[in-house]
Amino acid sequence: MAPPKKSKKSKKDRKLKKNLSLVPVEPKAADSDWWDSFWHKNSSTQDSSLSNDEEEGFKYFFRVSKKTFDYICSLVREDLVSRPPSGLINIEGRLLSVEKQVAIALRRLASGESQVSVGAAFGVGQSTVSQVTWRFIEALEERAKHHLKWPDSNRMEEIKSKLEEAFGLPNCCGAIDGTHIIMTLPTVQTSDDWCDLEDNYSMLLQGIVDHEMRFLDIVTGWPGGMTVSRLLKCSGFFKLCEGGQRLNENVRTLSGGVEIREYLVGGVGYPLLPWLITPYESNGLPASISAFNAVHGAARSLAVTAFSQLKGTWRILNKVMWRPDKRKLPSIILVCCLLHNIRIDSGDILQPDVALSGHHDSGYGEQCCRQVDPLGRTMRDILVKQLLHSRQTTAPK
């Protein structure tokens, strides 16, 4: 199609346009007093104990302290600053401040409430909540990458030291687990791949955490119909480990000259590998092996608890998502993991009752993976002997 022809303008029209361009357009002030109006409107609708404590109320609504909130705003400010005439506005016609945009996005992720409900709490429309949340997700995904990365050698040595101190597992680098993000899908998008064993449509999330339950690596975007062992094998992390580029640095020499490599701990749903140690299975196990299973389970619970905190803090991940865009959902999941790490890195204490009271994958039974690597079996046996030796040498005489 040819471009439309330009209309001829009279000298009078051109003169008028020139004069209008000299008149400055003054936008209404940004909505900088958002917190006062939000608190006044919403504090009485929640726990009565919050009505007199704005600091705790702020953490209740947005899951982070005011200081951490300001830090998050600083990360995304350049991307979210509203400029006329295309800047996002509220129902009063004022430009949304960066702070209010971040608050809207955090509330949407923290509560999992509908866009209509979140909008009503802030005095904005559903479409504004949608735009603001997605702009925030895109910005934080890019600006907060440094909060979720595989540790360098010095940091990994610190993690290994802390894990050994807590659980007696030498050279352990973290714990791994997986969880389902449940959703509904339009009929045209449904398939057996996305339907999991509990007949839910879901997307899987795999995470590796350190001693502070900080995510070191995540994998998502894969259909919930997969097993966690299959997800592991499809991940880039698996390929790096198998290629000797991960969990293959400092070897630990134990008493008697026995060497043990770096490894993770994981549940029975994972294969037993040289770099991934799973518990022993069967009843009537010897005391030494039962003791190892107990220690292994305690270390592995770091990942289980991390997912409970993640899905309890950012409840959008724990509710059934209504027809999400499967191409965008991985970004939402990643940003929630980034926010989880930012909270830990900032030293924010999680409020009581925020983490899920039950298991993060409630209703899902753990599938057993029967794959056993002989080197993995040898590694596990060495750890049992080391744990027994350690307890014998530290036992009071």
Image (spheres, grey):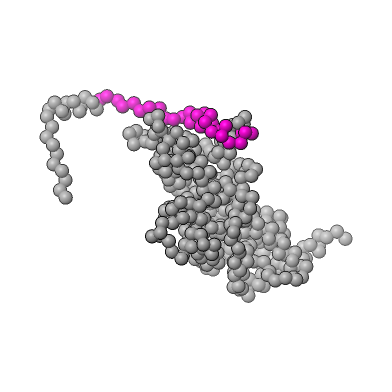
- Place of residue 220 in the rendered image (x, y in percent of width and height, measured from the top left): 49, 58
Q: Mark yes or no: residue 262 visible.
A: no
**Quarter where residue 52 is shown:** top right
Q: Residue furthest right?
A: 397
**Left or right of 205: which side holds 25?**
left
**Left or right of 69: which side holds 50?**
right
Q: Is residue 141 above or below residue 374?
A: above
- Place of residue 214 in the rendered image (x, y in percent of width and height, measured from the top left): 59, 51
Between 359 and 10, the one nearer to me in the picture: 359
Between 115 and 23, the one nearer to me in the picture: 115
Magenta stretch contains residue 390: no
- What residue is drawn where x is 42% and y is 43%? 130
Q: Is residue 79 above or below residue 240?
A: above
Q: Mark yes or no: residue 291 visible.
A: yes
- What residue is drawn where x is 65% and y is 59%? 300
Q: Residue furthest bottom?
A: 374
Range covered by the magenta-colored residues: 22-50
